[in-house]
Image: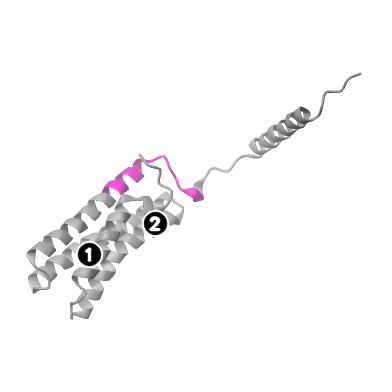
Amino acid sequence: MATVRQFEDLLAWKKSRELVSKVYKAFSGCKDYGFRDQIQRASVSIMSNIAEGFESGTRQEFLNYLYIAKGSAGEVRAQLYAAFDIGYLNIETFKYLNGLATECSRLVASFIKSLKTSELSGLQHKKEKSKKELEREELDQHIKRILEDSKKQPPQTS
């Protein structure tokens, strides 16, 4: 499994990015500007909340943002039904976009479940070292420098 170093590495974010692109393309010609704006904003909300949560620093904040992203995925799916019913989308486009939105929702839900059981607590809760641990590290570094310096100096002969 690849290490996740940034939100762009997350499959849920990648899939939500794809959804945004497809939603924008599908509704680019829609003259119902209020509807178009709402579905586009909801799709962008999914990827934005995944990213913002990842960058937030704590597991609890990340989970809160993921729940918001999941809610936005539900909003997109509901709006897709409305778009189909109103006649803004044909059945093929509806099925494709609904499948993408459903996949985003499932990926976020799976990520939430995984994060809830994880030992990771986030960067803001990184364990601080005690004074004793810091002193020990300082002593270890000092000893290491002495040993390195002794290797550099030629041996003294009497």
Numbered label tally: 2
The answer to which of marks 1 and 2 sits earlier in the sequence is 1
Where residue 36 sits, quadrant-wise, is: bottom left
Dot 1 lies on which element? helix
Residue 121: in magenta span: yes
Quadrant in the picture for the C terminus: top right
Residue drawn at x 22%, y 80% as measured from the top left:
33
Q: Please state if 52 lies on the left or on the right of 84 as rendered.
A: right
Q: Position of residue 116 (x, y in %)?
A: 35, 44
Distance between the alpha carbons at the discs numbered 1 and 2 = 23 Å
- Within-10-Å neighbours for mark 1: few <14, some 14–19, many 20+: some
Residue drawn at x 83%, y 23% as measured from the top left:
155
Q: What is the three-letter code of the residue carrying label 2?
A: Gly
Residue 9: in magenta span: no
Dot 2 lies on which element? helix
Q: Where is residue 20 in the image (x, y as percent from the top left)?
A: 27, 64
Q: Name the residue under label 2.
A: 53
Q: Which of 18 and 71 is in front in this view?
A: 18
User: Where are the magenta residues, as a range?
Assistant: 109-124
Q: Name the residue under label 1.
A: 22
